[in-house]
Image (cartoon, helix red, strand yellow):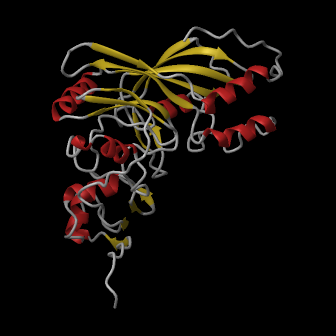
Amino acid sequence: MKRGAPTALPTRLFADTVAPLEAGTRLDLWLTARLPDLSRTRAKDLVESGHVLIDGRPAKAAHRVKAGERVEASVPPPPPEEMAAEPIPLAIVFEDDQVLVVDKPAGMVTHPGAGQPTGTLAAAALAHAPEMAGVGGPRRPGIVHRLDKGTSGLIVLAKTTLAYAALTAQLARRSVRRRYVCLVHGEVRPASGVIDAPIARDERSRVRMAVALPGKGKRAVTRFRVLERLSGATLVECRLETGRTHQIRVHLASLGHALLGDLTYGHRRERAADPALAALIPMLGGVALHAAGLGFTHPVTGAIVEFSSPLPDRIERLLSHLRNAPRDRTGSPSRKPLTM
């Protein structure tokens, strides 16, 4: 047998039924007892990422297992301890010896995860600034916050441990200013508002989040204002007070206004009555959401720094089409664009 590059380990599948004596045990602890090679942290990550099902449905790591429940798990091979740098071009907005601000394109994942081990922003940043290695962890060097794969726009990375500690502390205090612009289906009636609704993982799907019942999930607060009403769509500005997974997408969809291009929370048939719009949607390369503004206190100088990013062509094409589209059935005119 010839020696060569090591063969990638396959995903391991596991299934078993909870015994009566095991009832009441936390799911992550039950898994580590059945699969001793898993650490509790690894088991918890598998559960929270949707790789573990109980009777066919996603669960939480703190779930207390019940006798007779069927637990199924898919255990992918553990990622390498260190992430390889990849020389991928970056759109750098600002850089000094402490921080790096990048305008991320839609389609790029922020850091390695299930199903996306390479081609990430973190790997590209590591190639650009090797001193980031180990800042914030070996698998997420420099990553302070994240943007969804389908979202474009501004993101800040820390180049030093000092900057990482300062920026994560600002996020915890909710003093980082993040402004997003998005296109949503339908007419958003209030000119502005606040969505204060907790978010948790959707019990019916491993890839979705959902507005949770009172007392459950994590608090999530999104402030929004209408920028422009168009033909069958609305341009909306959102400012985050919290940073939950898919927060803007979940909150606006909960009001009945899913983002254009969002097949997870929105419509699978994008305006079938408008073939031209339907043809433009796939060109988004994600969802119609852009991180247009970012502000924080510089970790060394203490100065407040602000950055902005114009809407990318992928969203401008949709805007141009919608602004020139016929009025809706009610004949109501679009409002003039508001100042951004």
Q: Position of residue 46 (x, y in %)?
A: 32, 57
Q: Is 290 situated above or below 55?
A: above
Image x and y of residue 71, in percent: 36, 66
Q: Quadrant of the C terminus?
A: top right
Taking 334 as reference, is 262 left or right? left
Q: Viewer-proximal residue, 142 or 148?
A: 142
**Does residue 324 appear to the left or right of 103 in the view shown?**
right
x and y, in percent, of residue 253 in the image = 56, 32
In which quarter of the view is residue 144 placed?
A: top left
Check the image and report above or below for 292 versus 271: above
Q: Is residue 267 visible?
A: no
Q: Is residue 319 left or right of residue 166?
A: right
| In-image side of 121 versus 335 (left or right) | left
Give the number of callouts: 0
Quadrant where the image shows the N terminus: bottom left
Q: Which residue is rendered at x = 42% and y = 36% of the image? A: 147
Residue 81 quadrant: bottom left
Q: Which residue sits at x=23%, y=50%?
A: 138
Q: Splitting the image into 4 quarters, where does residue 322 fall? A: top right
Q: Is residue 152 above or below residue 34?
A: above
Q: Where residue 61 appears, x then y in whole percent? A: 29, 53
Visible residue check, residue 5: yes
Q: Name the residue: 24% across, 27% down.
A: 167
- Among all residues in the image, which is located at the extreme bottom? 1
Q: Nearer the viewer, residue 287 or 121?
A: 121
